[in-house]
Image: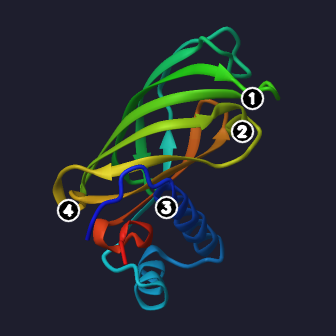
Amino acid sequence: MEIIQGNNNVLSELITLGDYVRELIGSGKSTAEIERVLASKDGYKNVTILSVIEMANITFKAKTNNAPNVGDANSHTDLLVDQQGRDIGTMKGQGWKIASLPDDSVISWYHETAETPLGRIETAGIWNSSAIWAGQWQSLFAAGVSGDVMGKIGVRQLYQDIPREKYLTLIVLLPLDQIKSLIKK
């Protein structure tokens, strides 16, 4: 397998996969059921899925409390809990509101580290913070760097449930050799 440098299809494939997993979660399927579906129907074997609640503990340097603005920055150490309320790790990181689009959407750069029982997961990239405030999911690239998830890549998706307090988080990781857009034929 040759990794093709600059292939923008990789992140698109991962976001599409994350969206599909969220759809399956929304239909009432458990993580174990989704992993079976992905393996049998879609050819994604050994997938790691974390669908958790992220309880935010954010330190802001922000112009306002009710919307993102260019120049804002934050750091956070959030608690990750499962659907039963059990602590399953932390998400620590920083974000900078770096630019605005012609429609006044604010774009942010984030870098985060999730510490979970499955291992450490690093996330980084840009997303539209205004879209998060508008009730839309946003995605960052994710990579497993230790433990059971080491060597897997995927996506971290975030939805703001209660502004600056509670987020819904989905992380989907899979082995490199199963990412269809990386496999050179």
Q: Is residue 55 above or below residue 70?
A: below
The residue beneath circle 4 is 148
Tell me the CA gap for discs 2 and 4: 32 Å
The residue to which callout 1 is attached is 105
Percent x, y of residue 176: 30, 65
Residue 85 x/y as whole percent: 45, 53
Q: Which mark is residue 131?
A: 2
Between marks 4 and 3 in the image, the one whose residue lies nearer the viewer: 3
Across and down, in percent, residue 119 comes to: 22, 53
Label 1 CA crowd tier, 10 Å (few <14, some 14–19, many 20+): some
How far apart marks 1 and 2 lie (CA) works out to 7 Å
Vertical order, 74 against 27 (above or below):
above
Q: Amino acid at mark 3?
A: Leu
Q: Residue furthest left?
A: 147
Is residue 143 shown left or right of residue 136? left
The amino acid sitting under disc 4 is: Asp
- On residue 14, the disc is 3
